[in-house]
Image (cartoon, coloured by chain):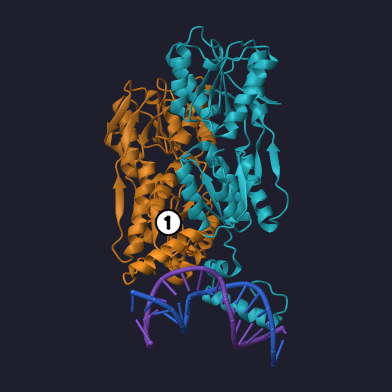
Chain colours: A cyan, B orange, C blue, D purple
DNA sequence: TTGAAAGCGCTACCAG
DNA sequence: CTGGTAGCGCTTTCAA
């Protein structure tokens, strides 16, 4: 009672208890406490691969905020595999986590699984409207549109898009934005200029190889993320194509690597760390108030201009 | 009893129980089980920053192996701060983790803390002989020596070293290796050619700036890790110094970025993922057999030659 | 082979 | 303000 700050404890007792605590090095067993209070003070974090710098940043944001609040974070890698996702969720649930942060939910993820859990779920990065959970991320339609329009404004007319796998709202939204931009610019949408990758460097490289062999050559490429953009740039260069001149390339994310002069990728900056922090905050808030309305938090993105888009500007640009 | 495979259960009962389990969607409460068995089936992972690709890879290795074995991984970031390390350890301990993986132990870390824990501890990457724990990592003396000797063999005579902070055996060992190489090559060790960084890109950049202004210019730089090496390269280039020609640069780690053509860092490859996997295995083994002798597992490293060392060779080289 | 009962360490409740 | 007691969901022991 002393340790839990129960009001009604005399100072004398309080002192004696505290002394004993110190002397014995007593630390409450959070496991037993959890069993009793039905609160484990731990949350789960599901991501596709912690090695991916995108998720690393989010994870750090989540953990920082969680630690502040006395929560522990249990993480699991799913490699974007639906089965692994389900197993991961169940595994975490049986550990009695108080809430769950999902970073790579798929539109095909079975809602029952999450609804039956009986614990709050927050979505970071990808929406999943059919789940009705709290969400934090950027407006990916606008992000895709902004990236494409930037190239259009700088005279690019034949824009290709390397999109992420279907099943991710982030990928779908960026495609939508790309199409919107084409339409606004009065450019025709062409199916063959959209190539699907899996957000990895390798898939970007392959897409780049493919696009670089096309004639007429596309004069602009919007990639669904930085990793694929960097892969595509490598591929284009290996084909003797000058990035920033023959072809303008833009990514989405602004991971650290993109800022290296040898890479110099123009991109749409996504505030990943903040997404993690905010996501965790949404979760903590909902743990406190389970029945408040679902919150959808849209953070701002900005264009980060470097060499790969060939517009000659270096710096950031709010959009 | 059915779920725990108690031998003495009739087939009839077993069937009925299993049916009920399925129907009700029963999942054992691991928390309650932990309270009773004193085993939580979870382990702790302490690292300085999950955003650092070095730790991301280790974390993935640990989690993969842990998940295979039915263990959950709780991670905490310490930013290499000793106080945060202690708090992190206590925080994890009160959650009754079955074991702990430490990736950035400091030589000054108080042994009592770890010994009093009463749970197995495994060290990954950095040794800490005063703790007497299991360990997995590479031979950093040899790594530092191999890197330096490589440059020496290619004619470099004025080798600088950007070392990591004191308090890390990995950093100290690499310095030792660097000195050994100089000695073997009959080169004088010069204090002023050793600059201390904190393993970050920024500190590498600053060190590079500093070294690049020295006259005579060092003709080779061994960095304590890739992040600092990349920072140093940027700095040198910004000074108009040609990396690979005027100055040869080598790092240690071989993080993914280093392989990008625009970076092309020659480095000593450390098997990070395997270190994570093996570290987790050592831990699981010790959880089973707490009193077996301490194991020290030294994994092989290899030289990965790219453009930054200017030796004209591209590829891997076992050492 | 079965089921009843005790108890892991904690918190919440309640009577003193 | 204090301390005793019940019980969280599980495993383990023991008697039937």
Q: Is residue A71 left or right of residue B250?
A: right
Quarter holding the N terminus of chain B? bottom left
Q: Is residue B78 left or right of residue B129?
A: right
Q: Is residue A193 left or right of residue A6?
A: left
Quarter holding the C terminus of chain B? top left
Read off the chain for label 1.
B
Q: How many marks?
A: 1
Q: Position of residue B175 (x, y in %)?
A: 38, 42
Q: Residue at x 60, y 53 (%)?
A: A66
Q: Residue at x 65, y 45 (%)?
A: A132
Q: Position of residue A154 (x, y in %)?
A: 65, 12
Q: Considering depth in this image, is A21 or A142 the residue closer to the camera?
A: A142
Q: Considering depth in this image, is B164 or A101 the residue closer to the camera?
A: A101
Secondary structure state at the residue bearing disc 1: loop
| Residue holding disc 1 | B71
Q: Position of residue A251 (x, y in %)?
A: 57, 25
Q: Position of residue B112 (x, y in %)?
A: 45, 66
Q: Is residue A39 visible?
A: yes
Q: Is residue B187 visible?
A: no
Q: Is residue A197 above or below residue B302?
A: above
Q: Considering depth in this image, is B109 or A148 the residue closer to the camera?
A: A148
Q: Is residue A144 above or below residue A160?
A: below
């Amino acid at each position: 009672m002393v340790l839990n700050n129960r009001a009604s404890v005399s100072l004398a007792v309080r002192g004696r208890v505290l002394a004993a605590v110190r002397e014995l090095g007593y630390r409450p067993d959070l496991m037993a406490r959890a069993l009793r209070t039905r609160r484990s003070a731990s949350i789960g974090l599901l991501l596709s691969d912690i090695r991916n710098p995108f998720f690393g940043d989010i994870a750090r944001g989540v953990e920082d905020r969680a630690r502040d609040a006395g929560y522990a974070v249990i993480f699991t890698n799913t490699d974007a595999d639906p089965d692994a996702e389900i197993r991961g969720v169940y595994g975490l649930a049986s550990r009695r986590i108080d809430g769950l942060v999902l970073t790579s939910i798929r539109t095909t993820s079975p809602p029952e699984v999450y609804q039956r859990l009986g614990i709050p779920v927050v979505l970071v990065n990808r929406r999943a409207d059919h789940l009705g959970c709290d969400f934090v991320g950027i407006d990916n339609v606008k992000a895709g549109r902004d990236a494409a329009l930037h190239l259009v404004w700088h005279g690019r007319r034949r824009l290709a898009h390397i999109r992420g796998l279907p099943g991710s709202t982030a990928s779908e939204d960026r495609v939508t934005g790309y199409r919107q931009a084409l339409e606004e610019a009065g450019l025709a949408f062409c199916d063959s200029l959209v190539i699907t990758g899996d957000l990895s460097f390798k898939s970007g490289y392959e897409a780049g190889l493919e696009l670089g062999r096309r004639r007429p050559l596309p004069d602009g490429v919007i990639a669904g993320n930085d990793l694929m953009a960097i892969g595509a740039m490598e591929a284009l260069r290996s084909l003797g194509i000058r990035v920033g001149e023959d072809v303008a390339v833009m990514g989405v994310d602004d991971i650290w690597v993109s800022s290296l002069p040898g890479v110099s990728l123009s991109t749409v900056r996504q505030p990943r760390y903040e997404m993690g922090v905010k996501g965790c905050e949404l979760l903590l808030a909902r743990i406190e108030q389970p029945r408040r309305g679902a919150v959808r938090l849209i953070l701002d993105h900005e264009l980060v201009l470097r060499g790969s888009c060939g517009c000659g500007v270096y710096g950031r640009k709010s959009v």
